[in-house]
Image (spheres, coloured by chain):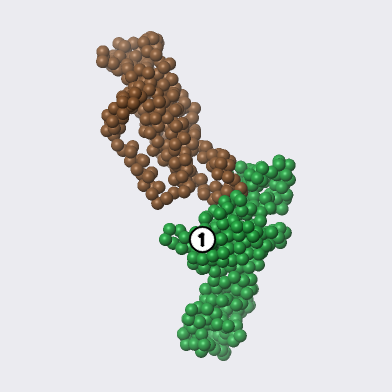
Chain colours: A green, B brown
């Protein structure tokens, strides 16, 4: 069991309210991603759940038990840090065994569990090395190994992949997702990278200035953003947002449409514009078009299409795919 | 990063480095040589460098005329006692300042350092009178406490610097892994801070061993360490350079030997954190 429930949790640093008041339910076995721009309070929220910071108000329940005042060691959670935070003076074996040693596990049990974890994480050949002799990816695996040996109620990940290079990040992303399938344990994962959020999460929590903007599955958030912030934050490249007369024609203050929902034609359409930069990704091409009435619009074309810089094109947004937002930035449904 | 340096520059710098080292070491060498001369040879003009009649008579006389073992014991008790006491006080202080700083932590550190800027003689009279009135003048315990207080700012500063180098994440990881504060200190913090603690200890033993102002002024015979032992040979009846040199050599030899054996640790400690 690994349900976590936050009720009106708040955190104040001096004068600065990092988290005004936040409530959230995390079900057992869920992979939840906290995502948001830097300084949105996502790491603070994770540290509150971990017990590394004290809450200023509210209640945290882990597994139905009040954990608000419990020290980190008593919460039964494991954490993987961005910096790996391995113990430099201990071998890989020592690092992975440490949590078991702390609870006074028997030597045979420790040896067996360390071996199991090392097998799962491909670390068997490195057990006697010191962390400084490992590559970034291996260090990250040791950190994960240290987290899994004690069968925690839930795993907490604090931007664990941001120190890795791009290729390794994709691999580790898959490995963590697979680990979640295998262990079926609750995981809370903090990232600023919305691609990580989209690819890994069962449930995404979008945070902004310490408030939850929206909670939902990745595709819910993508297809039905509840407000302008989520609309602009989720999706890469970003959703095109347009205000003014054009939005008023749709009875909204702002309208938004995603690049893949813009039709490009060289002969006819709603708006005429000039092709700016084209980004060729191979499978797709993202074309940035300067439209005099709107500004810059990003449109997706298929990878084969070549449009010359400066040439004129017509753009038409798909009518059913336009998101409308009111003057407060809330979605109009 | 290794840069390629021209051979001629390497040679020049090597020569300069040796000259500087010799210049610094020369007084000690001269003291050592003088301690084996007769009093007459010691003041001869021009001085004789190596070619004189080597004699150990100064050492015999110094040994006979004073209680060297007592001075030596006092030096050991005062330097080690004050350092250990200092560490006991400074470790929790540096710990708190490094790992849960407040907005005044920097001020406290600066204030402690500022006490080292005060001339010691400025507080000699009050401390002397205080010790006299409580009957602790010329006692080892008083010297241990005074030495500890004198070196405390340095101990706290050094430890603070070492502890600052330990990433907070690692301590938090230990807490997440189920370590209590005690286990965190035993299994994580201490092993990681040992080099820093060791070099702090060594440096402060050396500083306390060599401290002369307070030891000479606050002791007479019972608690007098080797610094007072040297001073007792620059007596009013005139200077006996050869005997003074013999006494000095006997006083500095133990700490030089300690420094020699621990130089690797000392250098490592003093440059700790300079290069990541």
Q: Name the residue under label 1.
A: A57
The picture places residue B241, in percent across and down from the top left corner, at 31, 16
Q: Can residue B253 be seen in this view?
A: no
> Considering only vertical position in the picture, is B225 above or below A195?
above
How many marks the image carries: the answer is 1
Q: Residue at x 35, y 22 (%)?
A: B138
At a point 28% along the width and 30% down the height, the residue shown is B126
Q: Answer with the quarter of the image where residue A128 lies.
A: top right
Q: Tag 1, which chain?
A: A
Q: Where is residue B19 in the image (x, y as percent from the top left)?
A: 37, 30
Q: Where is residue A60 in the image (x, y as percent from the top left)?
A: 58, 60
Q: In which quarter of the image is residue A184?
A: bottom right
Q: Is residue B276 above or below residue B252?
A: below
What's the residue at 42%, 27% (across, down)? B79
Task: Give the camera-side residue of A327 and B27.
Answer: A327
The picture places residue A187, in percent across and down from the top left corner, at: 64, 60
Q: Which of B113 and B261 is in front in this view?
A: B113
Q: Is residue B148 at all visible to an observer of this figure?
A: yes
Q: Residue at x 36, y 10 (%)?
A: B65
- Side of A185 relative to B119 (left or right): right
Q: Residues within 10 Å of mark 1 (few under 14, many from 20)?
A: some
* Tag 1 secondary structure: strand
């Amino acid at each position: 069991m690994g349900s976590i429930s936050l009720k009106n949790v708040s955190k104040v640093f001096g004068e600065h309210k990092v988290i005004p008041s936040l409530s959230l339910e995390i079900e057992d076995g869920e992979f939840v991603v906290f995502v948001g721009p830097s300084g949105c309070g996502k790491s603070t929220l994770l540290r509150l759940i971990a017990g590394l910071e004290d809450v200023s108000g509210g209640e945290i329940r882990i597994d139905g038990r009040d954990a608000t005042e419990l020290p980190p060691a008593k919460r039964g959670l494991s954490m993987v840090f961005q910096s790996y935070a391995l113990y430099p003076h201990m071998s890989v074996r020592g690092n992975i065994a440490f949590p078991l040693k702390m609870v006074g596990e028997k030597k045979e049990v420790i040896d067996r569990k360390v071996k199991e974890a090392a097998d799962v994480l491909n670390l068997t050949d490195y057990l006697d090395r010191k962390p400084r002799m490992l590559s970034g990816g291996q260090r990250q695996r040791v950190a994960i190994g240290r987290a899994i040996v004690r069968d925690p109620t839930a795993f907490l990940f604090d931007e664990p992949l941001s120190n890795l290079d791009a290729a390794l990040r994709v691999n580790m992303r898959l490995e963590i997702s697979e680990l979640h399938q295998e262990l079926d344990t609750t995981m809370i994962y903090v990232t600023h990278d919305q691609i990580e959020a989209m690819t890994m999460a069962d449930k995404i929590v979008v945070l902004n200035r310490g408030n939850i903007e929206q909670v939902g599955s990745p595709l819910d958030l993508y297809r039905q953003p509840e407000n302008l912030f989520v609309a602009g934050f989720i999706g890469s490249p970003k959703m095109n947002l347009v205000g003014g007369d054009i939005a008023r024609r749709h009875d909204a203050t702002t309208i938004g449409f995603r690049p893949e929902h813009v039709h490009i034609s060289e002969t006819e359409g709603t708006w005429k514009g000039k092709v700016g930069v084209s980004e060729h990704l191979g499978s797709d091409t993202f074309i940035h078009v300067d439209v005099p009435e709107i500004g810059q619009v990003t449109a997706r074309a298929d990878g084969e299409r070549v449009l010359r810089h400066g040439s004129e094109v017509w753009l038409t947004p798909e009518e059913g795919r336009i998101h409308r937002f009111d003057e407060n930035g809330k979605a109009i449904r | 990063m290794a840069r390629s340096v021209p051979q001629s520059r390497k040679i020049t710098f090597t020569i300069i480095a040796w000259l500087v080292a010799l210049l610094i070491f020369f007084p000690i060498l001269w003291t050592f040589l003088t301690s084996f001369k007769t009093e007459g040879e010691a003041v001869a003009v021009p001085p004789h460098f190596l070619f004189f009649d080597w004699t150990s008579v100064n050492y015999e006389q110094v040994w006979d005329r004073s209680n060297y073992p007592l001075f030596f014991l006092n030096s050991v008790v005062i330097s080690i006692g004050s350092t250990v006491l200092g560490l006991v006080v400074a470790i929790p202080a540096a710990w708190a300042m490094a790992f849960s700083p407040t907005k005044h932590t920097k001020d406290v550190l600066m204030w402690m350092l500022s006490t080292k800027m005060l001339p010691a003689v400025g507080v000699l009279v009050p401390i002397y009178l205080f010790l006299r009135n409580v009957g602790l003048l010329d006692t080892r315990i008083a010297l241990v406490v005074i030495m500890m207080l004198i070196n405390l700012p340095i101990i706290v500063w050094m430890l603070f610097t070492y502890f600052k180098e330990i990433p907070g994440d690692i301590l938090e990881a230990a807490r997440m892994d189920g370590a209590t504060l005690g286990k965190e200190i035993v299994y994580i913090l201490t092993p990681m801070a040992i080099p820093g603690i060791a070099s702090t200890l060594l440096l402060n033993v050396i500083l306390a061993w060599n401290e002369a102002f307070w030891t000479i002024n606050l002791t007479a015979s019972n608690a007098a360490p080797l610094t007072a032992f040297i001073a007792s040979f620059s007596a009013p009846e005139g200077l006996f350079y050869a005997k003074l040199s013999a006494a000095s050599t006997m006083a500095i030899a133990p700490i030089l030997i300690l420094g020699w054996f621990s130089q690797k640790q000392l250098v490592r400690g003093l440059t700790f954190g300079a290069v990541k």
